[in-house]
Image (cartoon, helix red, strand yellow):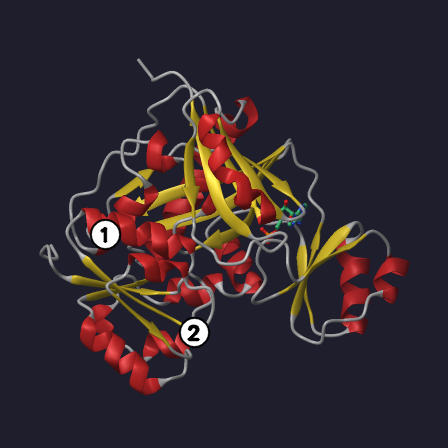
Amino acid sequence: MLPAGSTIGILGGGQLGRMMAVAALQLGYKVVGYAPEGDNVAADACSDFITAAWDDAAALARFADACDVVTWEFENVPLAAVAALPERLLACPPRALEVAQDRLREKAFAAGLGGSPAPYAAVESADELAAAIRRVGTPGILKTARDGYDGKGQWRVRSGVEAGALAFPGVTCIYEGFVTYETEFSVILVRGRDGTVRFWDSTANLHEGGMLARSVLPAGALVEAQVPAARELARKVADALGYVGVLTLEFFATREGPIFNEMAPRVHNSGHWTIEGAATSQFENHIRAICGLPLGGTKTRFEAIEMRNIVGEEALEAHKILAEPGEPHLHLYGKREAREGRKMGHVTRVGHAVK
Ligand code: AMP
């Protein structure tokens, strides 16, 4: 168990790191962050924050010297940056990052463990896209294999003609069949150093423009029926990676069963409701796991819960939400610029306590 007063290093400077840092402070730890120049809102909760490029060897060495354990809040941290840190500092094997950074790899990995992704093909050129469309069919989605998030780096393809008009992005892509689903849901688990796994309840996740808008509990009968199979896959993924901390897998609930979409080797936007809604939040359990502390319970505390993201300029007036009925819980991330489509905060509403 990492003693109180020790320092947790977080790679990445966004809101997930900020909320992780708040949980770490509560448990008596100090936090040092590391990320390139940007709106690093995690810095507000860190005793030190190193702003440097991912390939700055001297800065990474300074970061390593300051930390007793290192975790990440962002799955696209370059592997070379992680490899530059002493292995003993890494709470979780970096293979989790390696798999999750590449949509082709994560789909093959999940399929190898019995998961069912949508039909897909790797594409490197416009010709290969045409071939992939012949094999997989339309409608479909072309996605960059790496570095996409919140619907960025994605193009809907309704027909072969439309694909012909698409300027091929010039990087490795994945073309996947469009899934007709009833609901999207995620499985969020925490795995301790000793291999203990706990799951939070799965919310129904509603997306707008490729980005999560709301997470809702209860998630409905179809999701509930598919959660056991989805959890089984998530547990296998976590075990196979020797994972430590919070891991998220996203699924489409279809009439034919759960279709695996992607994984995130970190705390997740669809788990923000756990701060007020569960016995222990995803952030706190992540910190507990990486520090070797006993894990907290994950039980849902209320009969109904809704988490809604606050996006773009809505954040400028967000404090008004506090006057609304139902005791809304407001979280603002302290971002300097309320750009359109940017996650600025979230609000969680809870219903009656579970008896
Ligand atoms: P992703 O970045 O892969 O999570 O995609 C962002 C969102 O786009 C998902 O949460 C879905 O709402 C939608 N989406 C992505 N892939 C598919 C697919 N194959 N079929 C249907 N919808 C998809």
Q: Is residue 134 left or right of residue 242?
A: right
Q: Is residue 78 above or below residue 218?
A: below
- Relative image position of residue 143 (x, y in whole percent): 66, 61
Q: Residue at x 39, y 79 (%)?
A: 80
- Relative image position of residue 57 (x, y in whole percent): 33, 86
Image quadrant of residue 72? bottom left
Q: Quadrant of the C terminus?
A: top left
Q: Is residue 135 left or right of residue 268?
A: right
> Label 1: few (<14), some or many (≥20) within 10 Å?
many
Outermost residue toward the left in this view: 3
Give how far apart the Cα atoms at labels 1 and 2 are: 22 Å
Specify whether residue 91 is in view: yes
| Residue 36, disc | 2
Specify whether residue 86 is in view: no
Looking at the rendered structure, the kind of residue marked 1 is Ala
Q: Foreground: 289 or 103?
A: 289
- Relative image position of residue 308 (x, y in whole percent): 52, 36
Query: Upstream in the sequence, badge 1 or badge 2?
Result: 1
Outermost residue toward the right in this view: 161
Give the residue pinned by disc 1: 24
Q: Is residue 74 above or below residue 318?
A: below
Looking at the rendered structure, the kind of residue marked 2 is Pro
